[in-house]
Amino acid sequence: MSASRRGGPIGPTGPVVGRALQLLDAFSPDHRELSLSELARRASMPLSTAHRLVHELCAWGAVERGGDGLYRIGLRLWEIGSLAPRGAGLREVALPFLEDLSRSTGENAQLAVREGMELVFVERIAGSRAVPVLTRVGGRFALTATGVGLVLLAHAAVEVQEEVLSGPFERYTSKTVTDPVQLRRMLAAVRSNGFSVSDRQVTMDALSVGAPIRDGRGEVVAAVSLVVRHGSATPRPLAWLVRTSAQAISRALAG
Amino acid sequence: MSASRRGGPIGPTGPVVGRALQLLDAFSPDHRELSLSELARRASMPLSTAHRLVHELCAWGAVERGGDGLYRIGLRLWEIGSLAPRGAGLREVALPFLEDLSRSTGENAQLAVREGMELVFVERIAGSRAVPVLTRVGGRFALTATGVGLVLLAHAAVEVQEEVLSGPFERYTSKTVTDPVQLRRMLAAVRSNGFSVSDRQVTMDALSVGAPIRDGRGEVVAAVSLVVRHGSATPRPLAWLVRTSAQAISRALAG
């Protein structure tokens, strides 16, 4: 998502803070090390501006400059980021339950939250027999294709659902559902059944079943899923298992 | 560490970026949720300034405001922080080796890097028989007491060693070494032996043995340790194990 899309109106302190944060947006999983000129280009700002801002980011530790002259996200930002309740906080509470889920099945257990019109994977535990998946911790994904995404979308505000359902849709396989009418039916089923099913919607060999995690006030704040090889199990017994896990995590979050 | 201590000279764009980052410093493991007035007070800035800056931080997603009106570190900051090579990047590479270390012994395996005059724990795997430890992922600790800290200090630049050895020293138990002459001898031993020993220096029931992790250029970038109950094992065989793990992680980092 671009900085301009996430940026709000510019405050009375001027656009400097926003521009500094825009520099951080230049980093991505595929661009973890950047030269100053790459930073400036990717953040669409003059080299001199990027130079001044990166200096301030380095002073605090948000960015670090290596012996090779390249810039990287700094340890201090990772430290502060680890205080995010929806990131590391949630992960810490959920981790033992995800490990149980993955160990008892040998499959992939995934934990995700919604961020705007996408989901972010907060944790993934790879099982010993696990089918290959496309996810990465900290990575983003469309809400409409995965088990966790369908849960998060089914419980999102109406405006979010409308915007997502207005498309465009990511298509990963020939089974990826991209028809808004069919998606609406699937979301209604998620709400009434208490679980989601993504059948070969992301890769042709995977089936995932997701369930909602609720906070102390009963609001859906995250989703957990189990991803198994297509054909190895029917959704219903997987749903019992995943819902039980989701309820245990919800209880731990509330406590 | 306070913003003023880490802050560099203020650039030509003015102090706005520094002040915004100073607001983030108000969050800590013990202060994960803050009201606007707590934010302003902890960051030592007027309420009106804090209000303007927090608005810009929220627009980008560095900070989130809950339904209860309290501010928290945002998921976006966690996402960007997960791109820090010395944080999540290192953790990802080291995790399988830490799990092996912890599973084969039933004890705690720890991974840390140096940040200024302290260490930061990047991961901790609790073993099934593990002795209680004081560490938390993302938490800071003195360099002079733990197995990982002694490794990181032994391989730090001379200026860092001199500043740390000029004190003051954290004292956790009656066994915590706080004599600079004795510490210098211990650091020399770490360099010549290739491992560190912290014997009841943090808690009276724990012994930890640490070893250095090196990057592709041979520089020490992190340390791994095993923490066992005091009296349950002698340091030398633990050192063989931990050094072997550290070498495997170094090889994986270089590859």
Image: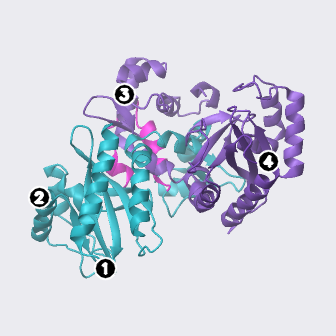
Chain colours: A purple, B cyan
- Amino acid of disc 3: Arg
Callout 1 crowding tier (Cα within 10 Å): few <14, some 14–19, many ≥20: some
Q: Are marks 2 and 1 in contact (CB under 8 Å)?
A: no
Instruction: Name the quadrant containing residue A71.
Output: top left
- Residue denoted by label 2: B192
Q: Earlier in the sequence, mark 4 or mark 3?
A: 3
In reply to whether residue B2 is colored magenta, the answer given is yes
User: How far is the residue under mark 4 from the one under mark 3?
Assistant: 57 Å
Give the vertical position of A19 relative to B232 (above or below).
Answer: above
Give the vertical position of B101 relative to A29 (above or below).
Answer: below
Task: Give the quadrant of the N terminus of chain A.
Answer: top right
- Amino acid of disc 4: Thr
Viewer-nearest of labels 1 and 3?
A: 1
The mark found on residue A52 in the picture is 3
- Residue denoted by label 1: B230
Q: Chain of mark 3?
A: A
Residue B159, position as x, y percentages in the image: 15, 51
User: How far is the residue under mark 2 from the one under mark 1?
Assistant: 24 Å
Callout 4 crowding tier (Cα within 10 Å): few <14, some 14–19, many ≥20: few
Residue appearing at x 52%, y 54% in the figure: A83
Residue B168, position as x, y percentages in the image: 22, 67
Residue B114, position as x, y percentages in the image: 30, 52
Viewer-nearest of labels 4 and 3?
A: 4
Viewer-nearest of labels 2 and 4?
A: 4
Task: Give the quadrant of the C terminus of chain A.
Answer: bottom right
Q: Looking at the picture, do discs 2 and 4 lie on one chain?
A: no
User: How far is the residue under mark 1 from the one under mark 3?
Assistant: 51 Å
User: How far is the residue under mark 1 from the one under mark 4?
Assistant: 50 Å
